[in-house]
């Protein structure tokens, strides 16, 4: 009978841990969905120029992998470039890329949110979700 | 005894199939594509094959490029435009593979026709070419009268090339790479957006390089 309280205590702790971890994994599953959707969107809309591995193409299309872009630009700026394109030259790893990037006007806020989440996860080393709400606000306030 | 027998059988079949395969490869020649005609010359009937006709356009260095520059050369042609957001970057990635692979092979050249020549003036092509780190005449990018380029594309290189406002970028065109031999015959058409197809093209270039 002495044992009962400790077993109950243990059960309580285990239950709390399970509940917590399941909460976390729900969020993580949601983020992973964004990443996977973002990856498919990347293949469809970005990969032709920026390449599958994000290495870009010579001086024509800038790389995305291993670049300072993820530190220099915030997510809102990246969202706006994806949606509206890039008309002026852009500096990537201190090199100017002059080629005009066409916008992806057909992408919805959700697509942009998923793409930014994927890009930041893959090349920005930043595993945070870029939420649909953030994407909506960013796109509303593009320059 | 049994396992050895099976092994031997398989070995025999293997050697036999290798012989068959190499036998095929030795004899393989590429077809001549396009419309064929017959012509009677001095009482003899000759087959006349489709050929790339005369053309003349300006390249990225604002110098004239004509069919005569490709006399005695094998070349790979394609149709693109510099502001193309869809398949052109993929085509250019693959064309770059050919450019780098055959940089020292003087019998082989590359030729890209712009299907948006009004925008793709020589200086635009120049900027594009220098950003790709490529040089003429190994890889000429040419521009000129739109109707002439479309006609050449459709009738001679047998590809789609025309304006279409509904397409992203405003033009519809195929991603084809066209392989032309030293006698101006089209010997193969490949999907230039597809790495495997371009591997196949490379095999065919190797075959053509051995032809006299």
Image (cartoon, rainbow, N blue to C red):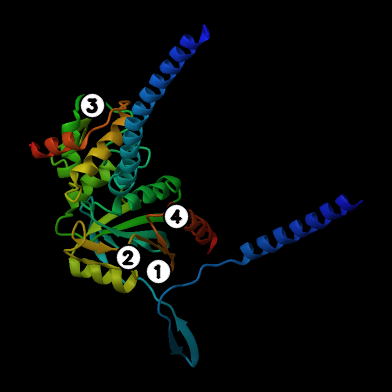
Q: Which residue is mark 4?
A: B198
Residue that appears at 40% across and 79% down: B35
Instruction: Name which of mark 4 and mark 1 comes first in the sequence.
Output: 1
Instruction: Name which of mark 2 and mark 4 comes first in the sequence.
Output: 2
Chain holding disc 4:
B
Residue that appears at 34% across and 39% down: A33
Q: Gap in Å between the C-alphas at discs 4 and 1?
A: 20 Å
Label 1 packing within 10 angstroms: few (<14), some (14-19), many (20+): many
Up the image or down, B30 lies above or below B198; here it is below
Residue that appears at 41% across and 16% down: A13
User: On the picture, is A43 further left or further right than A1?
Assistant: left
Label 2 packing within 10 angstroms: few (<14), some (14-19), many (20+): few
Instruction: Name which of mark 2 and mark 1 comes first in the sequence.
Output: 2
Q: Give the label, 1 or 3, closer to the camera.
A: 3
- Of residue B12 and residue B105, the one placed in the foreground of this image is B12
User: Label 3's element?
Assistant: loop
Chain holding disc 1:
B
- Of residue B21 and residue B117, the one placed in the foreground of this image is B21
Up the image or down, B148 lies above or below B103; here it is below
Q: Gap in Å between the C-alphas at discs 2 and 4?
A: 24 Å
Residue B1 shows up from this direction: yes
Q: Which residue is mark 3?
A: A94
User: Label 4's element?
Assistant: helix
**Residue, far bottom:** B43
User: On the picture, is A26 further left or further right than A10?
Assistant: left
Q: Which residue is mark 1?
A: B184
Q: Give the label, 2 or 3, closer to the camera.
A: 3
Question: Is there a contact, CB below 8 Å, between mark 2 and mark 1?
Answer: yes
Question: Is there a contact, CB below 8 Å, between mark 4 and mark 3?
Answer: no
Q: Which residue is mark 2?
A: B67
């Amino acid at each position: 009978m002495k044992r009962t309280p400790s077993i109950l205590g243990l059960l309580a702790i285990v239950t709390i841990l399970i509940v917590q971890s399941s909460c976390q994994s729900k969020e993580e599953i949601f983020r992973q969905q964004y990443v996977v959707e973002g990856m498919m969107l990347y293949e469809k809309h970005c990969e032709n120029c920026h390449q599958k591995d994000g290495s870009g193409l010579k001086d024509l299309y800038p790389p995305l992998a291993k670049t300072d872009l993820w530190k220099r630009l915030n997510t809102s700026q990246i969202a706006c470039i994806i949606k509206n394109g890039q008309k002026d030259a852009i500096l990537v790893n201190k090199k100017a890329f002059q080629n005009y990037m066409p916008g992806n006007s057909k992408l919805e806020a959700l697509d942009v949110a998923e793409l930014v989440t994927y890009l930041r996860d893959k090349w920005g080393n930043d595993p945070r979700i870029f939420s649909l709400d953030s994407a909506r606000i960013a796109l509303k306030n593009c320059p | 005894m049994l396992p050895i027998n099976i092994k031997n059988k398989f070995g025999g079949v293997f050697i036999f199939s290798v012989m068959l395969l190499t036998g095929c490869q030795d004899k393989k020649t590429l077809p001549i594509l396009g419309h064929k005609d017959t012509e009677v010359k001095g009482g003899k009937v000759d087959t006349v094959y489709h050929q790339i006709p005369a053309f003349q356009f300006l390249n990225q260095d604002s110098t004239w490029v004509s069919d005569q520059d490709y006399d005695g050369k094998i070349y790979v042609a394609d149709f693109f435009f510099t502001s193309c957001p869809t398949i052109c970057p993929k085509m250019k990635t693959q064309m770059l593979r050919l450019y780098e692979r055959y940089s020292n092979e003087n019998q082989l050249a590359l030729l890209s026709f712009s299907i948006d020549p009004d925008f793709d003036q020589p200086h635009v092509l120049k900027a594009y070419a220098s950003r790709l780190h490529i040089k003429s005449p190994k890889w000429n990018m040419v521009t000129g009268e739109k109707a002439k380029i479309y006609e050449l594309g459709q009738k001679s290189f047998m590809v789609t090339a025309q304006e279409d406002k509904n397409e992203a970028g405003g033009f519809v065109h195929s991603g084809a790479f066209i392989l032309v031999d030293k006698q101006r015959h089209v010997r193969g058409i490949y999907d230039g957006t597809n790495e495997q197809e371009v591997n196949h093209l490379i095999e065919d270039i190797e075959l053509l390089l051995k032809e006299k």
